[in-house]
Image: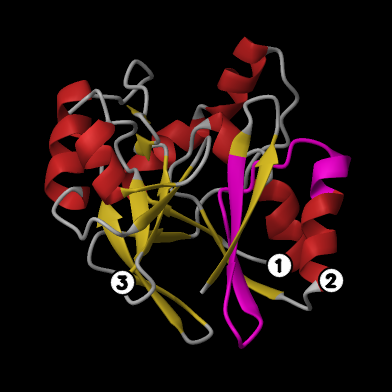
Amino acid sequence: MKVKSFTFSPFQENTYVLSDDTLDCIIVDPGCYNSSEENELVEYLNLNQLKPVRLINTHAHIDHVFGNQFVSEKFNLKLELHLLDEPILAMAGRSAMTYGLNYKPSPKAEINFEEGDEIVFGNTKLEILHVPGHSPGHVVFYDRPGKVIIGGDVLFRGSIGRTDLPGGNHDDLIRNIKEKLFTLENDISVYSGHGPETTIGYEKQNNPFF
């Protein structure tokens, strides 16, 4: 699986395009905020002859859903999201107003997934791990053979996701990271929703929250 990241919006959010040799791809957490960022995403897809087949959110905070409407309409894709984060998605417009930012309303999720389900595209299968704490329905996507996790805002290099937003819970996040992520192999790469990638082993040894 190839991982391509883009850093979008005033929140400096990481949007991911995941693809394999079939040229099918999925778009995870499209944070493209304006037409320039939308064009950057489309140009990459066109240049690499990729076909988007799924639109997926790790969670529904505003910075991760700015581009949901654009991607959904551009590629005729249904939004996929954990059921427990649908109330968070419904609050996105209000969140944008709080920050004084423009927001193209995201479509509602038409497909809900949960832990134990798989995200399948091309020849690739991603396991879904439910890791709440940053938000109630936050999930991560785990490419077990490739040793890659697309982690959203759960675990960062040297930090963790904030837990002071609606639906957040610090104790839950710490416990779920320990139980769901830190039990995995140390050499697994974690691609976070903000900042640089890291590894499970590095965070177990160096993250000050643990």
| Residue closer to the observer: 107 or 196 | 196
Residue at left 44%, top 32%? 88
| Residue closer to the observer: 2 or 138 | 2
How far across and how far down the image is residue 209, in percent?
22, 24
Q: Are marks 3 and 2 in contact (CB under 8 Å)?
A: no
Q: Are marks 2 and 1 in contact (CB under 8 Å)?
A: no
Q: Secondary structure at mark 2?
A: helix
Cα–Cα span, label 3 and label 2: 28 Å
Q: Earlier in the sequence, mark 3 or mark 2?
A: 2
In this rendering, the label closer to the viewer, 1 or 3:
3
Residue at left 32%, top 59%? 188
Q: Earlier in the sequence, mark 1 or mark 3?
A: 1
In this picture, is 150 found above or below 20? above
Amino acid identity at mark 1: Asn
Residue at left 71%, top 67%? 76
To which residue does mark 1 refer?
76
| Residue closer to the observer: 162 or 199 | 199
To which residue does mark 2 refer?
47
Disc 2 packing (10 Å; few <14; some 14–19; many ≥20): few
How far across and how far down the image is residue 31, in percent?
65, 41
In this picture, is 29 found above or below 209? below
Amino acid identity at mark 3: Arg
Cα–Cα span, label 2 and label 1: 20 Å
How far across and how far down the image is residue 12, in percent?
63, 31
What stretch of residues is rendered in magenta?
A: 14-38
In the drawing, what numbered circle is on residue 144?
3
Q: Quadrant of residue 7?
A: top right
Q: Earlier in the sequence, mark 2 or mark 1?
A: 2
